[in-house]
Image: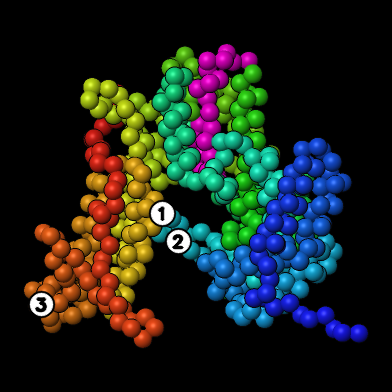
Amino acid sequence: MMKKKKLLWTEIRWKDCESKVSKLQRQIVEAYKAEDMDKVAKLQTLLISSFAGRALAVRQITSNTGRHTPGIDGVTWKTNEAKISAVNDLKEATPGRYLAKPVRRVMIPKANKPGEMRPLGIPTMFDRSVQALYNLVLLPIAEATADSSSFGFRQGKSMMDAVKAFVYQLKSKSSPRMVYEGDIQQFFPTISHDWILKNILLPTPILQQFLKAGFMMDGLLTPTEEGVPQGGIISPTITNMTLDGLETMLTTSLKTVWGSVQKSIKIFRYADDFVITGPESIKMRWLWTDKVLPALNQFMETRGVKLHPVKSKLTSIYEESVVFLGFEIRLEYFQGYRRFFIYPAHKNILSIIRKVRNAMQSLELSPGQVIEELNRILRGWGQYYSQVSSTEAFAKVNYVVWHAYLHWLKKKYPRTPVKKLVRNHYEKVGNSLIPVGSVVKDGKTIGVKLFRLTTIKAKTRKRTKNSVK
């Protein structure tokens, strides 16, 4: 009897795998909507045990940006042999047999919060692949039960979609002028495990392994009794499902309020960042204090999390701007009318300036290498703000980057006169001097030029000093 030939990683038919997984995911959604939980469980087991599901899970974690970062075992899957072996090993990732290893915890800087750090949990490659596999069966249910106002970690939705929907609501006929800026205090580390185990539709033994594996830091093992590790493949889906239901909560709390007011109260959420719009008048303050905020606090409490007592606040759009997802929304006069304008938030401008300065800390890098790193940072940031009124911010960042780069050159070549530095490391384009350099790739020398944010076609509106009163 002939032995069955082992399938190679390069021989996998990815389109067939994607088609099979998509079909099973659709069937899971249909069974869930029909409230046939037994069928849901059977379909989930079928997908998890399928070769297609296991292969796609391994492909996901070996093609993302964290593929070179190991967990506590120091293992990464770089070869095709290691990848196909992992696909076969995933057969053991079943309830009662799978045992997760502790995550490797590292501290990383908080975005837009200089000096503050947040924990990042890095699972092993195998644990990441198990999470990716089970995420395939959880995602269709998460999508089927998601709030329409939820924009985070959902296919086809983005941060910009959330901001635009929020501003569209502010412009609507219901004219909401009060905004509640919600800030959840330490959201990821404090989510209740009991709530997750009761409400997330995955096998309990598997969820317990994901949640209670603990973390290793400085050689010490610490158990985890609450929270979801930031860095896990399945964490965004679980945290999104934790906050789904905010829309229903608002609707329920406003049952006794007349319809015109209900239309002005809407929630817009991206992951754990959210805003709620509503009426502003002094007579309507009771609506917030007696209806919305008590219901919101109770919703959070059942999930083990709390709203930040200082950062969560009510803001009148007439009196000050609102910051949501790094965008500043302001009501200003324009051509005799009140209009809403969107700008990059001031703290995000300071954040990009810090990043570019940090990129020029090392004097060991060549000018070309520094320019390449700056270009990577500037292009991503510029693209994010390309659809709003950013020309003023772009010009400011360009100015800072230009002078910071010249300062770096003077530190790297302290004995070289400035005029010679400019002559050797800048190129005249029109009326501007642009930093240039070169890098070696595949044995070839390639010229690089500093990317200018002002080359991005963004809206030209300049922010005014004050919002409309």
**Front position among marks 1 and 3:** 3
SS for dot 3: helix
In this view of the protein, can residue 200 be seen by the observer?
no
Residue extending furthest toward the front: 2
Residue 378: horizontal and vertical position, in percent? 33, 59
Of the two numbered discs 3 and 2 in the rendering, the one whose residue sits closer to the viewer: 3
Secondary structure of the residue carrying tag 2 is strand
* Place of residue 162 in the rendered image (x, y in percent of width and height, measured from the top left): 48, 40
Image point (83%, 61%), residue name = 95
Write down the residue under mark 2.
Answer: 109
Which region is colored magenta?
256-276
> Is there a contact, CB below 8 Å, between mark 1 and mark 2?
yes
> In the rendered image, which residue does mark 1 sit on?
113
**Label 2 neighbourhood size at 10 Å, few (<14), some (14-19), many (20+)?**
few
The disc labelled 2 sits on which kind of residue?
A: Pro
Q: CA distance from mark 1 to mark 3?
A: 38 Å
* Mark identifier at residue 420: 3
Category of crowding for the residue at label 3, using alpha-carbon neighbours closer than 10 angstroms: few (below 14), some (14–19), many (at least 20): few
Query: Of callouts 1 and 3, which one flags the residue occurring earlier in the amino acid sequence?
Result: 1
Residue 338 in the image: x percent, y percent?
A: 30, 24
